Image: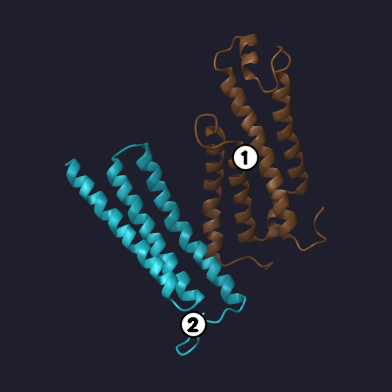
Amino acid sequence: MLNLLNTLASICIIIGLFFMVVAAIGLVRFPDFYSRAHACGKCDTLGEGMMLLGFILYEGASLVSVKLLLLIIFIFVTSPTALHAIMHFAYTSGVKPWKKGDARE
Amino acid sequence: MTETESVVIRTVARIAVPFIQVFALYVIVHGALGAGGGFQGGVVFAASFILMIIAFGLPCVRQRVSTRWLMICSVLGITIYAGIGLLCLLPAGNYLEYGAIEAALGIPHLHGYLIDAVEVGIGITVMAVMTSIIYDMADKGGESS
């Protein structure tokens, strides 16, 4: 039973790490601000959530797990909101989206 | 950027600010036992005011938390800190030597409560000073008092 939980925890953490790596690749490879923020915000949120879920499964039922669960909820609410604020401010202050054929920044 | 932000940001700020403030109080009170303390808790508390300024605009927050109130809070916090520090001099202890008060009054675990009280004082001062710094940085001149 413990081994099963540990395996599930490892799988969750590896999925989370995969999404974090995808976010890093997107940050390096995408051409402009909007697509980079898109990659980072979404993949970071899911990656952190999966990693914390893995930590919860590894820890078992304790006070630390409750704190991690609250952390997951907080990240899922606030991280996309912060991204939305940044993108909205960039749009209103006149950052143009990248179109096919433009030079990469 | 004087107008308020979009409805998403305002709603999430309205939900998140109480949790941030409760977490700040937790950090202040937990400072005697583990990681955290008055300074960190005060900064987190000030961060909730910064979030309110970002979401609702400076005039709205200034209406609720006035500069006069912040000045009173900063003086109150440093008075708590220095007062407890000087109180330790009465039973012939050093400055901020809580053990002297505990030995003189004979109340067990009193130094823990005194540490908490000092942390609360530091937290109040840091919160007030950080928020007033943000006020001075965020307003466009002419409306600071």
A10 left or right of A47?
left
Q: Is mark 1 on a helix, strand or loop?
A: helix
Q: Do pointers 2 and 1 mark residues of a single chain? A: no
Q: Mark 2 points at which residue?
A: A104
Q: Give the residue pinned by disc 1.
A: B39
Amino acid residing under circle 1: Phe
Q: Which amino acid does label 2 sit on?
A: Arg
Q: Can residue B65 be seen in this view?
A: no
Position above or below: B90 against B8 = above
Q: How far apart are marks 2 and 1 (CA)?
A: 44 Å
Q: Which chain appears cyan?
A: A
Please rate how many residues cluster around mark 1, counting C-alpha atoms within 10 Å: few if below 14, some from 14 to 19, many from 20: many
Colour scheme employed for the rendering of this structure: by chain
**Picture coordinates of residue B36, whole percent (x, y):** 54, 37
Height in image: A51 above or below B117?
A: below
Label 2: how many Cα within 10 Å (few below 14, some 14–19, many 20+):
few
